[in-house]
Image (tube, rainbow, N blue to C red):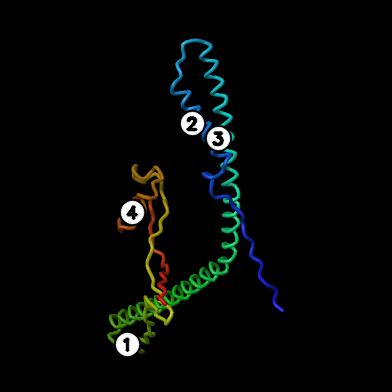
């Protein structure tokens, strides 16, 4: 027999405007404001009266802050607990997302590496063939080019969604000494804008990394 799921319910105060203690403190605050507005300081005795009111004001402030924490404390603790719980619930999804993306990118990077290697081999063989023709006037054996794989598709479509690729600029400062002065205040936002626009900055090495863009179809 499956045990029933017990769902805890948090009891949180949400109406400070209906709290008698809060309303009493507010009324006291209004009175103290009235006293302050009407007050004139013409003597040391007047200063003493104002001092007494300032002491009362400090006490009322402290009492209102304590009441505020009575309301917000449980809410904040509940919010923290809820966020922590849902962080646990979504952690497998985050890991699954990261693993899938990294494996797809690794596969695509390896396919591109192999394709570029095939092109390099053909280029070297073609250069060797041209050199032999210039030297002997003929080829002693066929060039023997290898088949070059097609570039990996930029987009994959399935019944559940689409996977696209996008080049993303990354950068690092390689020589701070030659970096223009306007970029020496660690203004990464400005540097990123320039890099994303395709421009170069002395002292900054920029490159593109492939990322994935997932678009789920609407149900």
Front disc: 3 or 4 = 3
24 left or right, relative to 5? left
- Which residue extends farthest top? 43
Label at residue 30 = 2
Mark 3–mark 4 Cα distance, whole angstroms, equals 53 Å
Q: Within the image, what quadrant is residue 209 found in?
A: bottom left
Dot 1: what SS?
loop
- Name the residue rendered at 64%, 62% in the picture: 8
Tell me which label, 1 or 2, sits earlier in the chain. Answer: 2
8 left or right, relative to 39? right
Tell me which label, 1 or 4, sits earlier in the chain. Answer: 1
Q: Residues within 10 Å of mark 3 (few under 14, many from 20)?
A: some
Q: Which residue is mark 3?
A: 25
Whether the residues at callouts 4 and 2 have beta carbons within 8 Å, the answer is: no
**Closer to the camera in the image, 186 or 76:** 76
Mark 1–mark 4 Cα distance, whole angstroms, equals 53 Å
Front disc: 1 or 4 = 4
Dot 2: what SS?
helix
Q: Which residue is mark 4?
A: 193
Q: Which residue is mark 1?
A: 139
Tell me which label, 3 or 1, sits earlier in the chain. Answer: 3
Give x and y (percent) for residue 24: 55, 36
């Amino acid at each position: 027999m499956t045990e029933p799921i017990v769902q805890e319910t948090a009891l949180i105060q949400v109406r400070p405007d209906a709290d008698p203690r809060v309303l009493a403190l507010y009324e006291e605050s209004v009175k103290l404001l009235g006293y302050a507005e009407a007050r004139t300081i013409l003597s040391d005795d007047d200063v003493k009266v104002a001092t007494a009111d300032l002491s009362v004001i400090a006490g009322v402030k402290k009492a209102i802050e304590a009441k505020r924490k009575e309301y917000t404390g449980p809410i904040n603790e509940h919010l923290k607990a809820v966020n922590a719980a849902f962080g646990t619930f979504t952690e497998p999804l985050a890991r699954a997302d990261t693993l899938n993306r990294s494996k797809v990118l690794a596969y695509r990077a390896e396919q591109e590496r192999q394709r570029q290697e095939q092109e390099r081999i053909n280029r070297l063989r073609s250069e060797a063939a041209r050199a032999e023709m210039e030297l002997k006037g003929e080829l002693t054996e066929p060039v023997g080019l290898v088949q070059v794989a097609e570039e990996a598709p930029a987009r994959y479509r399935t019944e559940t969604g689409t996977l696209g690729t996008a080049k993303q600029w990354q950068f690092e400062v390689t020589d701070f000494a030659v970096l223009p002065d306007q970029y020496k205040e660690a203004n990464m936002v400005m540097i990123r804008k320039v890099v994303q626009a395709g421009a170069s900055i002395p002292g900054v090495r920029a490159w593109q990394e492939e990322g994935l863009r997932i678009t789920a179809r609407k149900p």
